[in-house]
Amino acid sequence: MLSILIPVYAYDVGALVHTLHRQACELSQAWEIRLLDDASPANWLAKNRRLAQLSGVHYQELPHNVGRAKIRNLLCQQAQYEYLLFLDSDSGIDHDDFLAIYVAQLAPDRVLCGGRTYLPKPLAASFHLHWWYGTQREVRPAKTRRQQPYAGFMTNNFVVPKAVMQTIPFNETVTTYGHEDTLFGFQLQAAAIEIMHVDNPVLHIGLDEADRWLEKQRIAIQNLYQLHRQNPTLQTQALRWWIRLHRTGLLQLVMPFLKRKSSLWEEQLLQQHQPNLRLLDLLKIYWLEEVHQSQKRPFLK
Protein backbone atom coordinates (compact mmCIF):
# COMPACT_ATOMS: atom_id res chain seq x y z
CA MET A 1 0.00 0.00 0.00
CA LEU A 2 2.59 2.63 1.10
CA SER A 3 6.21 3.12 0.08
CA ILE A 4 8.04 5.60 2.31
CA LEU A 5 10.84 7.12 0.22
CA ILE A 6 13.71 9.16 1.63
CA PRO A 7 16.51 10.59 -0.52
CA VAL A 8 19.57 10.91 1.70
CA TYR A 9 22.63 13.11 1.47
CA ALA A 10 25.09 13.77 4.32
CA TYR A 11 22.53 13.39 7.09
CA ASP A 12 21.97 10.87 9.88
CA VAL A 13 18.44 9.59 9.27
CA GLY A 14 18.45 7.12 12.17
CA ALA A 15 15.96 8.93 14.39
CA LEU A 16 13.57 9.60 11.50
CA VAL A 17 13.66 6.02 10.23
CA HIS A 18 13.19 4.45 13.66
CA THR A 19 10.12 6.66 14.26
CA LEU A 20 8.66 5.79 10.86
CA HIS A 21 9.43 2.11 11.36
CA ARG A 22 7.62 2.05 14.71
CA GLN A 23 4.54 3.76 13.25
CA ALA A 24 4.58 1.62 10.10
CA CYS A 25 4.60 -1.58 12.15
CA GLU A 26 1.28 -0.45 13.64
CA LEU A 27 -0.40 -0.07 10.23
CA SER A 28 -2.73 -2.73 8.90
CA GLN A 29 -1.55 -2.11 5.32
CA ALA A 30 1.61 -3.28 3.56
CA TRP A 31 4.52 -0.84 3.68
CA GLU A 32 8.21 -0.39 3.03
CA ILE A 33 10.86 2.24 3.77
CA ARG A 34 13.41 2.95 1.03
CA LEU A 35 16.55 4.98 1.66
CA LEU A 36 18.59 6.03 -1.36
CA ASP A 37 21.88 7.76 -0.57
CA ASP A 38 23.06 10.29 -3.16
CA ALA A 39 26.81 9.59 -2.83
CA SER A 40 27.32 11.01 0.66
CA PRO A 41 30.82 11.22 2.19
CA ALA A 42 31.96 7.95 3.77
CA ASN A 43 31.40 9.04 7.39
CA TRP A 44 27.69 9.58 6.70
CA LEU A 45 27.36 6.26 4.90
CA ALA A 46 28.66 4.42 7.94
CA LYS A 47 25.98 6.01 10.13
CA ASN A 48 23.05 5.03 7.90
CA ARG A 49 24.04 1.58 6.60
CA ARG A 50 22.96 -0.09 9.83
CA LEU A 51 19.34 0.89 9.16
CA ALA A 52 19.14 -1.86 6.56
CA GLN A 53 18.93 -4.32 9.48
CA LEU A 54 15.39 -3.12 10.27
CA SER A 55 12.57 -5.18 8.82
CA GLY A 56 10.97 -3.54 5.79
CA VAL A 57 13.83 -1.07 5.32
CA HIS A 58 15.75 -1.06 2.02
CA TYR A 59 19.00 0.88 1.91
CA GLN A 60 21.04 1.65 -1.22
CA GLU A 61 23.96 3.92 -2.10
CA LEU A 62 24.45 5.61 -5.46
CA PRO A 63 28.00 5.68 -6.87
CA HIS A 64 27.76 9.35 -7.83
CA ASN A 65 25.52 12.28 -7.00
CA VAL A 66 22.47 12.60 -9.26
CA GLY A 67 20.63 15.53 -7.68
CA ARG A 68 17.30 16.27 -6.03
CA ALA A 69 15.04 15.52 -9.01
CA LYS A 70 16.57 12.34 -10.40
CA ILE A 71 16.94 10.65 -7.02
CA ARG A 72 13.20 11.01 -6.41
CA ASN A 73 12.46 9.51 -9.83
CA LEU A 74 14.77 6.59 -9.01
CA LEU A 75 12.96 6.02 -5.71
CA CYS A 76 9.65 6.01 -7.57
CA GLN A 77 10.97 3.34 -9.94
CA GLN A 78 12.13 1.18 -7.05
CA ALA A 79 8.96 1.50 -4.95
CA GLN A 80 6.82 -1.63 -4.55
CA TYR A 81 3.51 -0.03 -3.60
CA GLU A 82 0.91 2.20 -5.20
CA TYR A 83 1.27 5.20 -2.88
CA LEU A 84 4.55 7.04 -2.35
CA LEU A 85 5.33 9.12 0.73
CA PHE A 86 8.34 11.35 0.05
CA LEU A 87 10.16 12.81 3.03
CA ASP A 88 13.34 14.86 3.23
CA SER A 89 16.11 13.25 5.23
CA ASP A 90 16.36 16.20 7.64
CA SER A 91 12.76 15.79 8.80
CA GLY A 92 11.55 15.10 12.31
CA ILE A 93 8.20 13.61 13.34
CA ASP A 94 6.64 14.72 16.61
CA HIS A 95 3.21 13.05 16.54
CA ASP A 96 2.41 9.35 16.80
CA ASP A 97 -0.30 9.29 14.12
CA PHE A 98 1.77 10.78 11.29
CA LEU A 99 1.51 7.75 8.98
CA ALA A 100 -2.04 6.92 10.07
CA ILE A 101 -3.26 10.40 9.05
CA TYR A 102 -1.93 9.90 5.54
CA VAL A 103 -3.14 6.31 5.16
CA ALA A 104 -6.69 7.33 6.10
CA GLN A 105 -6.84 9.79 3.18
CA LEU A 106 -5.15 7.93 0.33
CA ALA A 107 -6.90 8.17 -3.02
CA PRO A 108 -5.72 7.26 -6.55
CA ASP A 109 -6.43 10.68 -8.06
CA ARG A 110 -4.91 13.14 -5.59
CA VAL A 111 -1.71 14.27 -3.93
CA LEU A 112 -1.55 14.84 -0.17
CA CYS A 113 0.62 17.60 1.32
CA GLY A 114 1.23 17.67 5.06
CA GLY A 115 3.26 20.85 5.45
CA ARG A 116 6.24 21.64 7.63
CA THR A 117 7.04 23.30 10.90
CA TYR A 118 10.15 24.36 12.82
CA LEU A 119 11.55 24.10 16.32
CA PRO A 120 10.64 26.96 18.70
CA LYS A 121 14.11 28.44 18.15
CA PRO A 122 17.16 27.57 16.02
CA LEU A 123 19.85 25.38 17.51
CA ALA A 124 22.48 28.10 16.94
CA ALA A 125 22.52 31.77 15.95
CA SER A 126 24.14 30.94 12.60
CA PHE A 127 20.93 29.16 11.52
CA HIS A 128 18.66 32.05 12.46
CA LEU A 129 18.02 33.42 8.96
CA HIS A 130 16.91 30.05 7.58
CA TRP A 131 14.76 29.42 10.68
CA TRP A 132 13.23 32.91 10.52
CA TYR A 133 12.31 32.56 6.85
CA GLY A 134 10.82 29.14 7.48
CA THR A 135 8.69 30.24 10.42
CA GLN A 136 7.49 33.40 8.65
CA ARG A 137 6.93 32.09 5.12
CA GLU A 138 6.66 28.30 5.14
CA VAL A 139 4.72 27.36 8.28
CA ARG A 140 1.09 27.53 7.20
CA PRO A 141 -1.93 25.51 8.33
CA ALA A 142 -3.76 23.39 5.79
CA LYS A 143 -6.69 25.83 5.77
CA THR A 144 -4.40 28.57 4.47
CA ARG A 145 -2.59 26.33 1.98
CA ARG A 146 -5.91 25.17 0.51
CA GLN A 147 -6.66 28.71 -0.67
CA GLN A 148 -3.92 28.33 -3.33
CA PRO A 149 -3.33 24.58 -3.36
CA TYR A 150 -0.68 24.51 -6.11
CA ALA A 151 1.32 27.54 -4.98
CA GLY A 152 4.54 26.98 -3.08
CA PHE A 153 4.45 23.20 -3.47
CA MET A 154 7.14 21.60 -1.27
CA THR A 155 8.60 18.13 -1.72
CA ASN A 156 9.70 17.63 1.88
CA ASN A 157 6.48 15.88 2.96
CA PHE A 158 3.91 14.68 0.43
CA VAL A 159 2.12 11.54 -0.77
CA VAL A 160 1.60 10.89 -4.47
CA PRO A 161 0.04 7.89 -6.23
CA LYS A 162 2.77 6.03 -8.07
CA ALA A 163 0.73 6.18 -11.28
CA VAL A 164 0.72 9.99 -11.09
CA MET A 165 4.45 10.13 -10.41
CA GLN A 166 5.15 7.87 -13.37
CA THR A 167 3.15 10.20 -15.60
CA ILE A 168 4.63 13.41 -14.14
CA PRO A 169 8.21 12.67 -13.04
CA PHE A 170 10.50 15.34 -11.65
CA ASN A 171 12.38 17.33 -14.29
CA GLU A 172 15.90 15.88 -14.25
CA THR A 173 17.39 18.88 -16.02
CA VAL A 174 17.19 20.60 -12.63
CA THR A 175 20.42 19.40 -11.05
CA THR A 176 21.22 22.25 -8.66
CA TYR A 177 19.25 23.58 -5.70
CA GLY A 178 15.78 24.96 -6.06
CA HIS A 179 12.35 25.03 -7.69
CA GLU A 180 12.10 21.47 -8.97
CA ASP A 181 9.19 21.33 -6.53
CA THR A 182 7.67 24.54 -7.94
CA LEU A 183 7.70 22.98 -11.41
CA PHE A 184 6.19 19.73 -10.11
CA GLY A 185 3.29 21.65 -8.54
CA PHE A 186 2.80 23.56 -11.80
CA GLN A 187 2.67 20.26 -13.74
CA LEU A 188 0.15 18.79 -11.31
CA GLN A 189 -2.07 21.81 -11.84
CA ALA A 190 -1.74 21.56 -15.63
CA ALA A 191 -2.78 17.91 -15.44
CA ALA A 192 -5.72 18.75 -13.14
CA ILE A 193 -4.41 16.47 -10.37
CA GLU A 194 -5.96 17.46 -7.05
CA ILE A 195 -3.66 18.55 -4.23
CA MET A 196 -5.27 18.03 -0.84
CA HIS A 197 -3.56 19.89 1.99
CA VAL A 198 -3.77 18.32 5.43
CA ASP A 199 -2.39 19.25 8.83
CA ASN A 200 0.29 16.59 9.10
CA PRO A 201 3.57 18.50 9.28
CA VAL A 202 7.12 17.33 9.78
CA LEU A 203 9.77 19.32 11.59
CA HIS A 204 12.40 20.84 9.33
CA ILE A 205 15.50 20.21 11.42
CA GLY A 206 18.47 20.39 9.05
CA LEU A 207 18.92 24.15 8.64
CA ASP A 208 21.66 25.89 6.66
CA GLU A 209 23.90 28.56 8.09
CA ALA A 210 22.85 32.02 6.97
CA ASP A 211 25.46 32.71 4.29
CA ARG A 212 25.03 29.28 2.71
CA TRP A 213 21.24 29.56 2.82
CA LEU A 214 21.31 32.96 1.13
CA GLU A 215 23.60 31.67 -1.61
CA LYS A 216 21.21 28.75 -2.17
CA GLN A 217 18.39 31.27 -2.66
CA ARG A 218 20.43 32.91 -5.42
CA ILE A 219 21.04 29.54 -7.09
CA ALA A 220 17.33 28.72 -6.80
CA ILE A 221 16.46 31.95 -8.62
CA GLN A 222 18.79 30.95 -11.46
CA ASN A 223 16.90 27.66 -11.70
CA LEU A 224 13.59 29.49 -11.57
CA TYR A 225 14.60 31.71 -14.49
CA GLN A 226 15.53 28.69 -16.64
CA LEU A 227 12.30 26.90 -15.76
CA HIS A 228 10.32 30.02 -16.67
CA ARG A 229 12.03 30.09 -20.07
CA GLN A 230 10.90 26.51 -20.63
CA ASN A 231 7.42 27.06 -19.12
CA PRO A 232 6.41 30.73 -19.58
CA THR A 233 3.17 30.32 -17.63
CA LEU A 234 5.05 29.11 -14.54
CA GLN A 235 4.39 31.61 -11.75
CA THR A 236 5.86 32.50 -8.38
CA GLN A 237 5.59 35.77 -6.48
CA ALA A 238 9.11 36.77 -7.54
CA LEU A 239 8.36 35.99 -11.18
CA ARG A 240 5.09 37.92 -11.12
CA TRP A 241 6.78 41.03 -9.77
CA TRP A 242 9.72 40.73 -12.16
CA ILE A 243 7.41 40.34 -15.17
CA ARG A 244 5.20 43.24 -14.02
CA LEU A 245 8.15 45.58 -13.59
CA HIS A 246 9.48 44.60 -17.01
CA ARG A 247 6.15 45.25 -18.70
CA THR A 248 5.83 48.70 -17.16
CA GLY A 249 9.42 49.63 -18.00
CA LEU A 250 10.16 50.37 -14.35
CA LEU A 251 12.73 47.63 -13.92
CA GLN A 252 15.33 49.27 -16.13
CA LEU A 253 14.89 52.48 -14.14
CA VAL A 254 15.34 50.85 -10.73
CA MET A 255 18.07 48.33 -11.62
CA PRO A 256 20.93 50.74 -10.79
CA PHE A 257 19.33 51.33 -7.38
CA LEU A 258 18.86 47.58 -6.78
CA LYS A 259 22.47 46.93 -7.77
CA ARG A 260 23.79 49.58 -5.37
CA LYS A 261 21.70 48.25 -2.51
CA SER A 262 22.04 44.50 -3.08
CA SER A 263 25.22 43.99 -1.03
CA LEU A 264 23.85 46.09 1.83
CA TRP A 265 20.59 44.13 1.86
CA GLU A 266 22.46 40.83 1.93
CA GLU A 267 24.47 42.04 4.94
CA GLN A 268 21.31 43.15 6.72
CA LEU A 269 19.67 39.78 6.14
CA LEU A 270 22.71 38.01 7.52
CA GLN A 271 23.04 40.18 10.61
CA GLN A 272 19.58 41.21 11.78
CA HIS A 273 17.86 39.29 14.57
CA GLN A 274 14.49 39.64 12.83
CA PRO A 275 15.57 40.22 9.21
CA ASN A 276 13.22 42.09 6.93
CA LEU A 277 12.22 39.46 4.38
CA ARG A 278 10.99 42.17 2.02
CA LEU A 279 14.68 42.76 1.33
CA LEU A 280 14.96 39.16 0.17
CA ASP A 281 11.95 39.70 -2.11
CA LEU A 282 13.75 42.66 -3.70
CA LEU A 283 16.95 40.66 -4.04
CA LYS A 284 15.08 37.91 -5.88
CA ILE A 285 13.83 40.43 -8.44
CA TYR A 286 17.36 41.79 -8.80
CA TRP A 287 18.81 38.28 -9.21
CA LEU A 288 16.19 37.40 -11.85
CA GLU A 289 17.08 40.46 -13.90
CA GLU A 290 20.78 39.81 -13.36
CA VAL A 291 20.59 36.32 -14.84
CA HIS A 292 18.27 37.57 -17.61
CA GLN A 293 20.76 40.25 -18.65
CA SER A 294 23.69 37.84 -18.46
CA GLN A 295 22.02 35.52 -20.97
CA LYS A 296 21.07 38.33 -23.37
CA ARG A 297 17.76 36.69 -24.20
CA PRO A 298 14.52 38.41 -25.21
CA PHE A 299 11.99 39.05 -22.49
CA LEU A 300 9.06 36.61 -22.51
CA LYS A 301 5.90 38.70 -22.36
Image (cartoon, grey):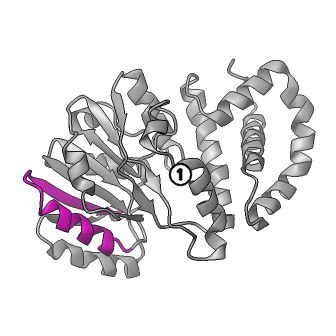
| Quarter where residue 236 is shown | top right
Amino acid type, label 1: Thr
Q: Residues within 10 Å of mark 1 (few under 14, many from 20)?
A: some
Task: Let me know if residue 17 is in the magenta part.
Answer: yes
| Residue numbers of the magenta segment | 12-38
At which x and y percent is residue 176? 53, 51
Residue 277 lies, with reference to residue 148, above or below; the image says below
Given residues 167 and 65, the one toward you in this image is 167
Residue 290 lies, with reference to residue 20, above or below; the image says above
Q: Secondary structure at mark 1?
A: loop
Residue 47 lies, with reference to residue 163, above or below; the image says below
Task: Let me know if residue 278 is in the magenta part.
Answer: no
Instruction: Left or right? Give the position of 155 relative to 98.
Output: right
At which x and y percent is residue 80? 14, 49
> What residue is rendered at 11% in x and 69% in y?
55
Given residues 164 and 73, the one toward you in this image is 164
At which x and y percent is residue 65? 41, 60
Residue bearing mark 1: 176
Given residues 168 and 102, the one toward you in this image is 102
> What residue is rendered at 62% in x and 69% in y?
127
Q: Quadrant of the C terminus?
A: top right
At which x and y percent is residue 71? 35, 52
